[in-house]
Amino acid sequence: MLADTQANASGKYYSVDRRGVYFEGKELELVANGVANGDVESHIHQRYPQGFSRHGLQYFRDSWIPGTFEDWRGGMIEQLLEATRLAHYPDKPGRFQSMFATDSLDSAKRFREGHGSPEHGIYEIQPQGKVHRGDMALLAVGNTFATTDHKMHLYWQGKTLELAGYSPFWEHVIELPALVVGRVA
């Protein structure tokens, strides 16, 4: 059973600063591509001529040597998500050119508890472009390729699963540039 998502009624977004780079009034921007050196870099620049977010640098552009199977699986999920978006949902903001946030302070605190540490600040973010709401809990490999493909499509459709014991975690993909309004926690 599928459930449709709803838009963010408050219009406020909150992001956990795990890298320690946010401050009030900072505009978060794409990192521009440098001069292409070789075929692979030319390919990268052709696909993403505007540059990359930090997330895109980590999962697409820069050298990435996975340390664990979980690191490798996370990278493969990112590639599948982007391929699905490009093929079927090109109007959605690309994860490699975006940042991520929640639509409530409580959700940002839960994210920090599971994926950060108490000293990581939580900041209000003001989008300046596209925003997409997707269920982050879907970003896992299924027991078949078809199940995994289905999850990728649900994510970009803004839908989730309605299953006993399943709990979605809504994240917002915010196209850069975006503005850091200020620290809230």
Image: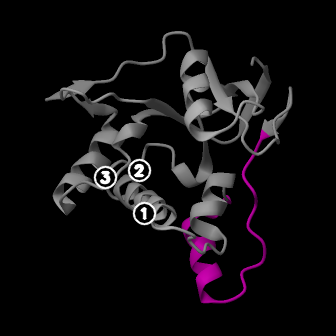
When asked about the image quadrant of residue 15, the answer is: top right
Q: At x 33% / y 27%, what residue is drawn?
A: 167
* Residue 155, placed above or below residue 49: above
Residue 122 location in percent, x, y? 72, 26
Q: Which residue is mark 2?
A: 90
Q: Amino acid at mark 3?
A: His
Q: Position of residue 162 (x, y in %)?
A: 20, 27
Q: For residue 22, which quarter of the picture?
A: top right
**Residue beneath the point at 64% across and 64% down:** 49
* In magenta stretch: residue 155: no
Quick check: 154 left or right of 38? left
Which residues are drawn in magenta? 28-51
Residue 88 disc label:
3
Please report whichever mark, 1 or 2, sits nearer to the chain's N-terminal start: 1
Instruction: Report how many numbered discs are placed on residues in the image.
Output: 3
Name the residue type under label 2: Pro
C-alpha distance separating marks 3 and 2: 6 Å
Single out the residue that lies furthest toward the bottom: 38
Q: Quadrant of the N terminus?
A: top left
Q: CA distance from mark 1 to mark 2?
A: 24 Å
Mark 2 residue crowding within 10 angstroms, few (<14) / some (14–19) / many (20+):
few
The residue beneath circle 1 is 73
Secondary element type, mark 2: loop
Disc 3 and disc 1 in contact, CB within 8 angstroms:
no
* Closer-to-camera residue (144/91): 144
Do tag 3 and tag 2 residues touch (Cβ < 8 Å)? yes
Nearest to viewer (mark 1 / mark 2)? 1
How many other residues sit within 10 Å of disc 1, few (<14), some (14-19) or many (≥20)? some
Going by the picture, which residue comes out furthest to the left?
Answer: 1
